[in-house]
Image (cartoon, helix red, strand yellow):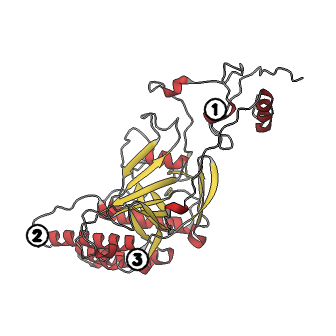
């Protein structure tokens, strides 16, 4: 005879336990907190927008010996990225390893052509060839970055843990080419006609495809960690961390989406030279945050953080010690509408879509467990009682 079993204490089911969520767990067993009097806590206040959740800070900010603020990322391991193109990341509470890949040539051709056009417009205006200065934002330099964090926590100014932001991204040099590119840029700043000679040099360098690392993009997290030290001219904006930064600190997985400034005219080198297309690229991967004053930074992290910061502060002004965000590419999709190889298809790594060969999983009829089976199943989970 099986004794009637009743817990004297509440069973606290964590939000994630070996991939089984609390609600899914209850549905599978066909249980309710009332039926068996197990005392499962149902916090209905989670669904209320007027509740304030007190949480611990998601990021451990530290101060170096010179009084500069920095942090050490805990959810991503990048020691194998440059040599082996492998990243290990903690996503949704679980550590996984992913292959890092290069964006394809169609994207590179589109990015370069739009970049060259952009510089041509700037040069024409500065040299007096035109009085019009109507360069739109967006396109090659302003993709949208989407991130997600945890359901309860964050800055306290939103009930949502999803975030999309438009940021100024660029491609970055291969590690072995950073010093060379910096040298060429330094010469222009010292002896050239700024900014025209700088724009022309950039046009030349971007067309030398072998100089650039096609596995990543880069931007700066302008508003996180400021002021970073006592001499920082940046005034406090009321919070220390952007939504993007907080989300990445929890889950480094992200999506980056580019859409062209203009439709194709039919003379471009990509997309088979077809006209009337709107190039639209999507990348899925991971954000590698580099805190400028982190004493544990590798030589590469120091070099790339300096490169991206100098490109920004020399041209736009301001501080040169901003947090750097490298986006590592794991997958690329071509989302261009009306283009047969596009339409939301994965192109890196290549994927063949054959509907007839796709596996269709039919849900199996659920079997209701007996009371004895429920008890035995609970025992195997080793839940705290």
Q: Is residue 144 left or right of residue 59?
A: left
Residue 317 against residue 250 in the figure, above or below? below
Q: Earlier in the sequence, mark 1 or mark 3?
A: 1
Q: In which quadrant is the N terminus drawn?
A: top right
Q: Position of residue 349 (x, y in %)?
A: 51, 68
Q: Residues within 10 Å of mark 1 (few under 14, many from 20)?
A: few
Q: Is residue 315 left or right of residue 30?
A: left
Q: Which residue is mark 3?
A: 181
Relative depth, front residue between 1 and 346: 1
Q: Position of residue 352 (x, y in %)?
A: 50, 67
- Name which residue lies at 55% across and 46% down: 250
Q: Position of residue 3 (x, y in %)?
A: 86, 21
Relative depth, front residue between 252 and 110: 110
As drawn, which residue projects farthest toward the left? 131
State which quadrant residue 85 falls in: bottom right
Relative depth, front residue between 170 and 46: 46
Q: Which residue is mark 2?
A: 130
Give SS at disc 3: helix
Give SS at disc 2: loop
For the residues labelled 1 and 2, say whether their Cβ atoms are less than 8 Å apart: no
- Name which residue lies at 61% across and 44% down: 363
Tag on residue 27?
A: 1
- Name which residue lies at 48% across and 74% down: 174
The nearer-to-camera label among 3 and 2 is: 2
Q: Position of residue 117 (x, y in %)?
A: 24, 71
Residue 173 against residue 256 in the figure, above or below? below
As drawn, which residue projects farthest toward the right? 1
State which quadrant residue 21 falls in: top right
- Residue 329 appears in the figure: no
State which quadrant residue 269 falls in: bottom left
Q: Earlier in the sequence, mark 3 or mark 2?
A: 2
């Amino acid at each position: 005879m099986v004794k009637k079993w009743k817990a004297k204490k509440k069973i606290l089911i964590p939000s994630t336990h070996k991939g089984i969520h609390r609600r899914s767990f209850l549905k599978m067993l066909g249980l309710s907190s009332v039926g068996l009097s197990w005392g499962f806590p149902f916090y209905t206040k989670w669904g209320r927008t007027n509740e304030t959740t007190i949480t611990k800070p998601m990021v451990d900010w530290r101060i170096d010996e010179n009084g500069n603020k920095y942090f050490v990322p805990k959810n991503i391991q990048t020691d194998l990225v440059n040599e082996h193109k492998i990243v290990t990341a903690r996503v949704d509470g679980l550590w996984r390893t992913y292959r890092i890949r290069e964006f394809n040539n169609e994207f590179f051709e589109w990015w370069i052509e739009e970049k060259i056009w952009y510089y041509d417009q700037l040069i024409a205006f500065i040299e007096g060839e035109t009085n019009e200065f109507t360069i739109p934002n967006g396109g090659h330099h302003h993709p949208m970055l989407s991130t997600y964090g945890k359901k309860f926590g964050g800055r306290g100014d939103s009930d949502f843990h999803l975030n999309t932001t438009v940021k100024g991204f660029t491609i970055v040099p291969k590690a072995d080419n950073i010093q060379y590119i910096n040298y060429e840029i330094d010469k222009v700043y010292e002896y050239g006609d700024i900014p025209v000679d700088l724009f022309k040099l950039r046009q030349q360098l971007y067309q030398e495809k072998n100089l650039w690392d096609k596995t990543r993009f880069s931007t700066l997290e302008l508003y996180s960690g400021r002021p970073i030290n006592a001499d920082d001219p940046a005034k406090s904006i009321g919070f220390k961390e952007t939504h993007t930064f907080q989300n990445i600190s929890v889950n480094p997985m992200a999506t980056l989406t580019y859409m062209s400034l203009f439709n194709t005219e039919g003379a471009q080198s990509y997309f088979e030279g077809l006209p009337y297309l709107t190039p639209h690229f999507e990348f899925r991967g991971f954000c590698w945050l580099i805190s400028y004053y982190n004493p544990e930074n590798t030589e590469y992290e120091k070099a790339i953080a300096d490169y991206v910061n100098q490109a920004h502060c020399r041209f736009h002004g301001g501080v040169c010690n901003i947090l750097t965000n490298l986006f590592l590419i794991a997958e690329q999709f071509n989302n261009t509408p009306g283009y047969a190889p596009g339409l939301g298809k994965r192109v890196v790594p290549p994927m063949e879509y054959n509907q007839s060969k796709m596996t269709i999983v039919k849900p199996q009829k659920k079997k209701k467990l007996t009371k004895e089976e429920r008890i035995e199943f609970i025992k195997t989970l080793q839940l705290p009682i």
